[in-house]
Image (cartoon, grey):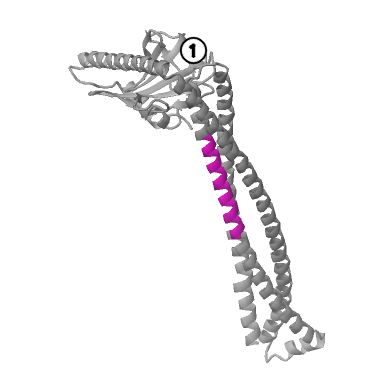
Amino acid sequence: MKLRSMFLKSLKGAIIISIILFAAVVTAQTQSSKQDKSELEKQRQRIEEKISYTRGLIKKTTNSKKKTQNELALINKQISLRKQLISNYNQDIQYSNVSINKINNQISVMENDISSLKEEYADMLYHAYTNKNSYSKLMYIFAADDFNLAYKRLKYIQQYTEVRKQHAKSIQMAQQELTEKIAKIKEIKKQSEELITTQEVEKRSLADDKSKQQLALNGLKKEEKSLKAEVQKHEKERKKLNQAIKRIIESELAAERAKSNGAFTLTPEGKMISENFIKNKGFLSWPVNRGVITNTFGEHAHPSLKGIVTYNNGVDISTDASSSILTIFAGKVTSVFSIPGAGFNVIVTHGNYKTVYANLGAINVKEGQNVALNDSIGIVLDQGSNTVIHLEVWRVDAKGGTPLNPSSWLKN
């Protein structure tokens, strides 16, 4: 009696409960893996869309016989995106390998559990067979010293029968789970093989992109003299833009100080707008419906001209000709001006933050006008094979203005 009681406790407390907990852990791990892979798939889709769009822009630039800096910038962007895509595939393949290892471990544990369950079940069947006589069961009950003990023996026989049924069900469930795990491994292995095949295709495409990059570099080297002149012209335009922005900021600061007895203070509305602008960092809309960043913020060595370093106070976004330029946040147009050869420029103020939209071919706003998010302020300047909108983000305080990296503010 004592051995049987210990057996029942062990059966309920160890094997059945461990299977339930094991199944729960497996389910949680599977859900987490699905979420990780789902996010990778979404990221991959975004990268592939950018690659497709960039490829289209490159085709438009290659129609021109003359090699341009923008063509090289687009090819460089294509290479960068391709590397991101290959890295994405690497991560996905690693997740698959981790999942396969986990499931293999789970299968090993489950096989051991099933083996233990079957051994226990065989003992139970043997015990049931040796005590199958109904007369023996009745004698076991009636041999009790009192009614309470007889009742306990009756309940024991009933419970033992029920436990045996549950045990058989547990074996069936465990075997079904094992079959599903084996099928899952086959599925993941197949997906992993497909990912590896696609990754190899992307690696070959990357090699092609690098060949195009070299051709573009060679083409630009042949036109080094005219290219240097173009870079100098572009840097002069950027310098004029920076000087104009600083003059406008200093002028606005002087006006604010005049109103506030020499201090720089924001109105309650201005403070609220500034706070909302900050809260949306990393989630601001893009200034075009479709585009890719081809020149990033900060100091850069020129990709084809040795010894030449350029500095960008914002980002350059390559886009389609005639693209509408959209506000990335609600605000007030505080300045509209033009730079000969570099198109129109619009500054929109958002409390003590400003966004600058440069290289517009036409504008449809005026100073003092309030604009909402995604309002069209003009159209990008079409320079043939070079259709780029320049965006800057500035923070203004009592000391003056500071350019910020727009990539940190725009939505990914």
- Label 1: which secondary element: loop
Say which residue label 1 marks. 383
- On the image, the x and y values in percent for residue 241 come to 34, 15
* Residue 379 painted magenta: no
Left/right placement of residue 4 relative to residue 391 reads right
Question: Nearest the camera: 226 or 184?
Answer: 226
Q: Where is 68 relative to 123, above or below?
A: above
Name which quarter of the figure residue 347 lies in. Answer: top left
Image quadrant occupied by the N terminus:
bottom right
Highlighted magenta segment, given as a residue range: 81-102
Task: Look at label 1 and name its amino acid.
Answer: Gln
- Can I make out residue 172 in this image? yes
Question: Nearest the camera: 181 or 14?
Answer: 181
The residue at 38%/18% (across/down) is 228
The 10 Å Cα crowd at callout 1, few under 14, some 14 to 19, many 20 or more, is few
Q: Where is 250 relative to 165, above or below?
A: above
- Can I make out residue 36 in this image? no
The residue at 77%/90% (across/down) is 139
Left/right placement of residue 390 relative to residue 167 reads left
Question: Nearest the camera: 320 or 228?
Answer: 228
The residue at 60%/48% (across/down) is 34
Q: Where is 8 relative to 247, above or below?
A: below
- On the image, the x and y values in percent for residue 316 come to 44, 23
What type of secondary structure mainly makes up the magenta span?
Answer: helix
- On the image, the x and y values in percent for residue 53 come to 57, 26
* Residue 97 painted magenta: yes
